[in-house]
Amino acid sequence: MASKPTKRKSIHATKLNFRPTTSDINIEFKGTKPTCEPTSIKEIFMLMVLYLCKKSLFFDTNLKVGIYLASLFLISLIADVATIPRGYLSRSDNILNKYFVKFAWGWNLLLLSPYVIFTSYVYCCGQFKRIAQHHLPRLAIATLLWYFWTNLFNYIEASFGRCQIKQYSSKGSCLKAGHMWNGFDTSGHTFILIYGSLVLIEETRSMVSWDSIKEFLRLEEHNRATRQTEQSTNPLRNLSIEEFQTLQYNYEKYTPYIRGVFISITIIQLLWDIMLVCTMLYYHVMIEKFLGGCIAILSWFFTYRVWYVHPNVLPSLPGEGVFKYIKKITKEPTAPVHRRRTGSIVNGNSNPMFMGRPIYTTGVNPAEDDSVTR
């Protein structure tokens, strides 16, 4: 008598050794990495504005310096020999020159001071001593250089010039009498506008990877909560608990202000470039402007490319704090590829190859086989 067929059990109903269940107490569950919070429309708009500001400020600095020098020579030379149509910006009393260029260094300090303080307070984890030693001195050094050079320009003009009326021996008395003082007037405006622009660009480089700090904070908080720090490459992994909490609080608190100041700095730097073109077209002669620009570039190069990059000399570069969050892009040298030139696809007695595999598997080369018709 045939046995009654039984209903086949589902494979999912069995407890297989290689399919552990959640009731198994010997299994250790590790938390997954937290996902990013959804980005609001306001945040997207802000990121777009910041992207445009970064593209403007962080244009290749070496190329920008070359453009400055070439423009100072060519545009100023053309302005010396040709008649340039004059407009509102050619007047010395225009609003941009009167309220901005004449107080250019004051505007730079007004924006850079809070920017440097806020950013360094974040990436130095609130360590006031480190901020005072490594970052604030840069602003003091830049101010001293500005003060020294502008006063030296005025001293040279006043000491080695002469009035058009010989009876006046000093520049002040000559100008007060309504006469013209003839001297070598190195363009202080050119110096301030170029040096000020380069200082603004260098000091705001701490903003290059600023948003990455938020990601580092999110991942490090997860790693510390799950105690998964043995293989972490997060730059915040060596921070103490107090430093980490201080960084979290300061980053969230000061980032909106830092972004606002950064946008203002971008606008001011664009204004300096516009007024520099006006100076090239309407003020001073070519040699006076070119010399002022060269001194500005040399001052920038000596401080930010020679002095501050030295690891054992204070102050430090912008962005260097308790941890490193700015990624330095280095180009790895590529080995030259030497290719052997061949006259045809058949090289000597070897078989032709395609993607490393021989085309003819029989070992017969058509170039050597007389039976192959062509």
Image (cartoon, helix red, strand yellow):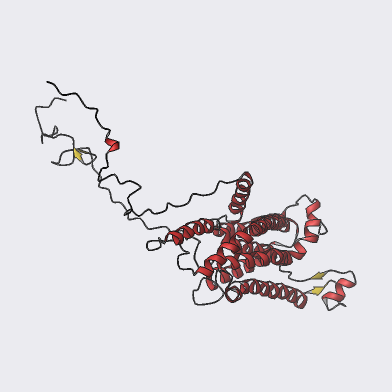
- 16 displayed left or right of 157: left
The quadrant of the picture occupied by the N terminus is top left
- 336 displayed left or right of 300: left
Residue at horizontal 9 percent and vertical 27 percent from the top: 371
| Relative depth, front residue between 281 and 63 | 63
Res 221 visible: yes
Q: Splitting the image into 4 quarters, where does residue 172 fall?
A: bottom right
Residue 124 x, y percent position in the rendering: 56, 69
Res 318 visible: no
Residue 57 x, y percent position in the rendering: 61, 56
Q: Which residue in the rendered view is the most extreme toward the front?
A: 1
Residue 248 x, y percent position in the rendering: 56, 62
- 66 displayed left or right of 269: left
| Relative depth, front residue between 94 and 346 | 94
Please, is residue 125 above or below residue 214 in the view? below
Q: Splitting the image into 4 quarters, where does residue 246 fall?
A: bottom right
Q: Splitting the image into 4 quarters, where does residue 100 fall?
A: bottom right
Please, is residue 330 above or below residue 181 in the view? above
Residue at horizontal 45 percent and vertical 68 percent from the top: 238
| Relative depth, front residue between 295 and 237 | 237
Residue 150 x, y percent position in the rendering: 71, 72
The quadrant of the picture occupied by the C terminus is top left
Residue at horizontal 27 percent and vertical 48 percent from the top: 339
| Relative depth, front residue between 220 and 132 | 220
Please, is residue 313 above or below residue 291 in the view? below
